[in-house]
Amino acid sequence: MQCVRAWRGLSPLLRGAQLSARTQTQSYTTAARMDLSGIYPPIATPFTATEDVDYPRLEANLQKYAKIPFKGLVVQGSNGEYPYLTEEERVEVVRTVRRSLPADKLVMAGSGCESTKATIQLTEKMAAAGADVVLVVTPCFYKGKMDSRALIQHFTKVADSSPVPVVLYSVPANTGLELPLDAVTELSQHPNIVGLKDSGGDITRIGLIVHKTKTQDFQVLAGSAGFLMAAYCVGAVGGVCALANVLGRELCELERLCVSGRWEEARVLQQRLIEPNTAVTRKLGVPALKQAMEWFGLHGGACRSPLQPLTEAETQQLRRDFTSDGWL
């Protein structure tokens, strides 16, 4: 199999003075240097029995993740249940992660809101809390009006104002809206927009985005472990994968195999990851991810209402999806 990476890594982000104090020019210079390549778990948010954020258990998870060769962590992504957290909680979780995580690990913080104004404000707060880069999801409540013109204006205004680099986030399974190709192509030219997390799973689209943006410092991250190898084949540089919360070392190994061109070994490992990945994403979702975390020695726990725990039948199905491929 002849697969190559279309993008070659830039030098790592250099941590400097407080980002919020930098000029916009300095921010854009930082954006041009940022290397996103690698694996990121979109971490879960543990809760107490009263549904408050359980910061001690969060920190315990972070200590375990620090021992895995992740490039960084995504905080307040879809698996962090960000729509169910207050703005104050979202920012405090990011602050906690940055304080607990080694300095060489990137913190990519979800700062997307429905309005452009709110997104700009939360982006600034995330940067002040220690985020190295923000992940901005497509606004979708009025999805019938979220055409390319509206989305380009939204992301451009956010990137113009952001003190840290911006990664676009397309997750049609949750938003019912895919970020259009023409919008991605135009936005890739913005000096403070460094990449895209694409969770749609359309490999032809990912390959075309890589091709259309190859003249820019623009990097594509696969949004799921189920198509990670295929995404590397068409030029993606890494992945933000829910399954990395429980099989993080294995996903980092898959990355290593792909980057080193060991495609047959990569294929075998990728195939074993598909069923458990589907179980904790499209099939059973965040409650399943949190249950699997418990099996693998991490703190998952319950979700915040109205998300419901797995039924007994769903739990048994989840266990089968992990045991059939030898993970449990």
Image: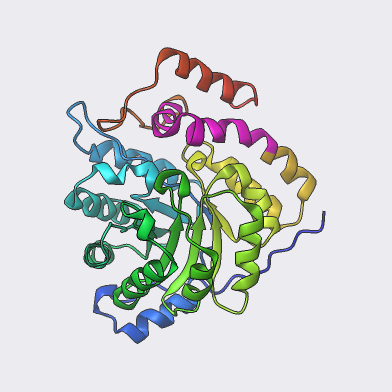
Residue at image position (74%, 43%) is: 267
- Let me know if residue 37 appears in the view: no
In the image, taking residue 14 as reference, residue 273 lies left or right, namely right
Q: Residue at x 65, y 53 (%)?
A: 203
Left or right, 91 with respect to 257, comes to left
Q: Position of residue 63 (x, y in %)?
A: 38, 43
Question: In the rendered image, which quarter is residue 98 located in?
Answer: bottom left
> Residue at the location (32% across, 58% down)?
112
Q: Is residue 20 left or right of residue 35?
A: left
Above or below, 299 relative to 59: above
Q: Residue furthest front?
A: 144
**Image position of 38 with respect to 194: above or below:** above
Nearest the eye: 227 or 261:
227
Name the foreground residue: 222 vs 173.
173
Q: Is-magenta flag for residue 286?
A: yes
Residue drawn at the location 46% of the way across and 18% of the way down:
315
276 lies above or below 19: above
Is residue 270 shown to the viewer in this render? Answer: yes
Q: Main secondary structure of the magenta part?
A: helix
| Farthest residue, direction top | 312
Q: Is residue 266 magenta?
A: no
In percent of width and height, residue 293 lies at 43, 31
Which quadrant of the rendered structure holds the C terminus?
top right
Q: Position of residue 233 (x, y in %)?
A: 70, 57
Relative vertical location of residue 176 with respect to residue 181 in this rendering, above or below:
above
Magenta residues?
271-293
Residue 19, how many percent across, how many down?
A: 29, 74
